[in-house]
Image (cartoon, grey):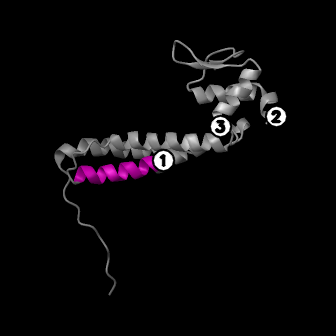
Amino acid sequence: MAHLAYEIKAPIRPENQAPKAALKGIQKALQHETDLVGLALHGAASKLLDNWLTAIDDGNTDNLVDDVTDLIDRLEGFKAAARNSLPVQNGGFGRICAATWLKQLARKGVVVYETDAGGFGFTGCDCDKYTSYDDALNGALQAHPEITEMT
């Protein structure tokens, strides 16, 4: 005789119905992601959302949004590692430290800077559109391929 596996779930408390419905709505919306970044978001968010739905059922009172903050922090670490490894033309530093690139740029009269408005740019840049110092440094390197060819 075959045994069917099943799980007995506690009834959903009325106060948990609205948050759970909203979280399930987020899960459903994420299913339509089709590009690479969207699929990565779907994977990470689905894990969090599944965990949160269980946590709500279990009466967990932790700040679940902290999970998103932790994920973003880890992605920032991943971004830094990727930037160091990727070639300049792909947004990276080509395994050369930022300080070395900054010295090479300075020899050509190019300086990477932060604006008073909190943006970033570099000498000769038409606009200060960069959102991070590293993005502006990579933009300067791409704008001056002669510097990356010297290395």
Q: Where is residue 126 drawn, in percent x and y?
A: 69, 14
Q: Where is residue 61 drawn, in percent x and y?
A: 21, 45
Sequence-first tag of 2 and 3:
3
Residue in the picture at 51% in, 17% down: 118
Quarter of the rendering occupied by the C terminus? top right
Q: CA distance from mark 1 to mark 2?
A: 39 Å
Q: Nearer the viewer, residue 76 or 29?
A: 76
Q: Main secondary structure of the magenta part?
A: helix
Q: Secondary structure at mark 3?
A: loop
Of circles 2 and 3, which is in front?
A: 3
Mark 2 burial class by Cα count in 10 Å: few <14, some 14-19, many 20+:
few
The residue type indicated by label 2 comes to Glu
Q: Which mark is residue 97?
A: 3
The residue type indicated by label 3 comes to Cys
Residue in the picture at 19% in, 56% down: 11
Q: Nearer the viewer, residue 6 or 86?
A: 86
Task: Read off the residue under disc 2.
Answer: 149
Residue in the picture at 27% in, 52% down: 55
Q: Is residue 83 above or below residue 4?
A: above
- Residue interval drawn in magenta: 44-57
Quarter of the rendering occupied by the N terminus? bottom left
The reply to whether the magenta stretch includes residue 49 is yes
Of circles 1 and 2, which is in front?
A: 2
